[in-house]
Image (cartoon, rainbow, N blue to C red):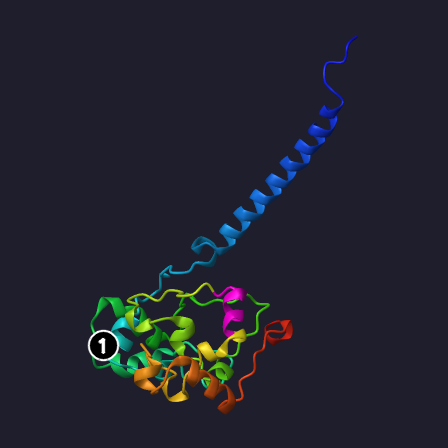
Amino acid sequence: MAQIFHYSANNLSKLGIIVGLLSVAGLGGILFELGADSSYATRQGEAREQPVPFSHTHHVGSMGIDCRYCHTSVENSWFANVPPTKTCMNCHSQIWVNSPTLEPVRASYRTDQSIQWTKVHDLPDFVYFNHSIHIKKGVGCETCHGRVDQMPLMYQQNSLEMRWCLNCHRNPQDYVRPREFITKMGYNPETDAGADQHTIGLRLMKEYHIQKLDTCYTCHR
């Protein structure tokens, strides 16, 4: 019987199989990267439902309450504490005392049972993050958390992915600010600190002894 296909067809079929497998693998890699970086995966920009619709826009933006009034441990501890109900009642025992929206706050105060807030900036358990050291090195609240003074409901401004953290760790001069502006929203280096960010950043790196830490052990211990 005469041969139907030329011998070269064997090589072409093998090449076709290899190209097909590589294409599938490449497409899978692209879809994985797009999925991992998507807001669906990182929950970036997603406002979280809370037991009480606490507005940072009102408390921080309109009333000018400093971040540290509520998050009292942030300068001296690895975590930024959620304030106890008593902190809320310092004001709300006098204002909005009959508001239905604030009934969970009053109930918490009466029963001494904590409000079950939903955590917004939730890093994986294998990541070590210390708030106090970042503040000591001049990393502002809004650098990571965004303009909370413009957030009626709190959401995650940044992706919190490792590459995002590393960008700051490798280029701290682009992000650090004088400590007196740590909690300032809308910080502008030229108008607030009198120089451009690069100049201020390089100066603060020396003054605050900031190192470019990007080893695995820095965050994974």
Q: In the drawing, does residue 84 fall left or right of residue 35?
A: left
Mark 1 residue type: Ser
Q: Nearer the viewer, residue 88 or 14?
A: 14
Q: Which residue is mark 1?
A: 62
Question: Where 74 sits versus 98, above or below?
Answer: below
Main SS category, magenta section: helix
Examine the structure image and report whether residue 28 is included in the region drawn in magenta: no
Q: Which residues are magenta?
A: 160-168
User: Given the current orientation, which residue lies at the most extreme bottom position?
Assistant: 207
Q: Exactly how many numbered labels are in the figure?
A: 1
Q: Say which residue appears at 73% left-offset and 25% top-offset.
A: 8
For residue 51, say whether it is visible. Answer: yes
Q: In the drawing, does residue 167 fall left or right of residue 16?
A: left
Examine the structure image and report whether residue 162 is included in the region drawn in magenta: yes
Q: In the drawing, does residue 34 fall left or right of residue 98?
A: right
Q: Say which residue appears at 50% left-offset and 67% top-offset.
A: 164
Q: Using the rendered view, name the quadrant where residue 73 is placed.
A: bottom left
Q: Using the rendered view, name the quadrant where residue 14 is placed.
A: top right
